[in-house]
Image (cartoon, helix red, strand yellow):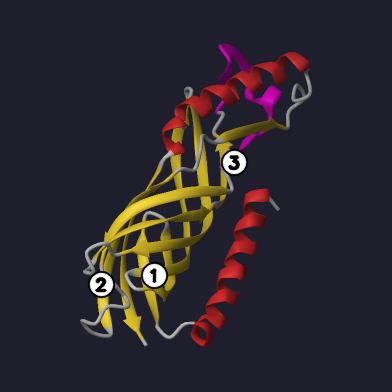
Amino acid sequence: MKVGTRVGLVAAVAILLACGNARATFNELAVAAKAGTLGLGGDLTTNVIPQVNLRAGVQWLGFDFDAQFDDIDYDVDVDSLYPLVLVDWYPFNGSFRVSGGVLFNASDVQLQAKLGTSVEIDDVTYTAAEVGTLRGDVEFRSVAPYIGIGWGNALGRTGRWGLATDLGVAFTGSPDIDLSATGPIATDPTFQARLAEEEKDIEDDLEFFKIYPVLSISLFYRF
């Protein structure tokens, strides 16, 4: 199991345990179902001091798509778990909030190359038989700072049901790529050096993912 996945699972379990004890510790509590760029999931919100809430949640995101990196076509498989812990501050004592916290990034992103009859790696052409299967793992920072703004207070006094939105960014850092092949030249030092250059090229293509936009909408219920 990847380090990021282990960190995310531990964080998710810790959040669930904390949520189980929150009702006994704080006098206000709200739950929410949410959807957005981090996937589907839910939040639990409780009070800390006036105008400040503590919010914890978990979201899951999974999908497949085709992409091209450095002229090689890949099948990309994304399966991610995102525990999130935030402090929400309502500076005007209304629905507008400023949020800050941490995102636990348990992303599992796999690449599978579609080689055809040949493939060019670091400007050198190899046959598909030489390379075999070409796969890649994409690793992100396990813990990412988060800042954002939003509207809606699950602990407000406008009713038990309501909607809330979030708009922010998580600083996930530049991804690391690890490519591996299964063919007869997989262990050749020259091929390994060229594969390392290919990893750098893909990392450059994915550089924009170091800042991940977080957009979501939630339906909450206050107890």
Residue 19 picture location, percent across and down:
53, 77
**Front in this rendered view, residue 74 or 85:** 85
Q: Is residue 204 rendered to the left or right of residue 135?
A: left
Residue 134 magenta = yes
**Circle 3: element type:** strand
**Front in this rendered view, residue 63 or 205:** 205
**Residue reaching furthest front?**
50
Q: Residue at x 56, y 29 (%)?
A: 115
- The residue segment tinted magenta is 116-140
**Mark drawn on residue 163:** 2
**Circle 1: element type:** strand
In the rendered image, the vertical position of residue 105 relative to residue 74, given as above or below: below
Q: Residues within 10 Å of mark 1 (few under 14, many from 20)?
A: many
- Labels 2 and 3: the sequence-earlier one: 3
Of marks 2 and 3, the one in the foreground: 2
Residue 176 picture location, percent across and down:
59, 34
Q: Given the image, on which type of amino acid does mark 3 rest?
A: Glu
What residue is shown with label 3? Answer: 139
Q: Given the image, on which type of amino acid does mark 1 rest?
A: Asn
**Spatial CA span between label 2 and label 1:** 16 Å
**Circle 2: element type:** strand
What residue is shown with label 1? Answer: 53
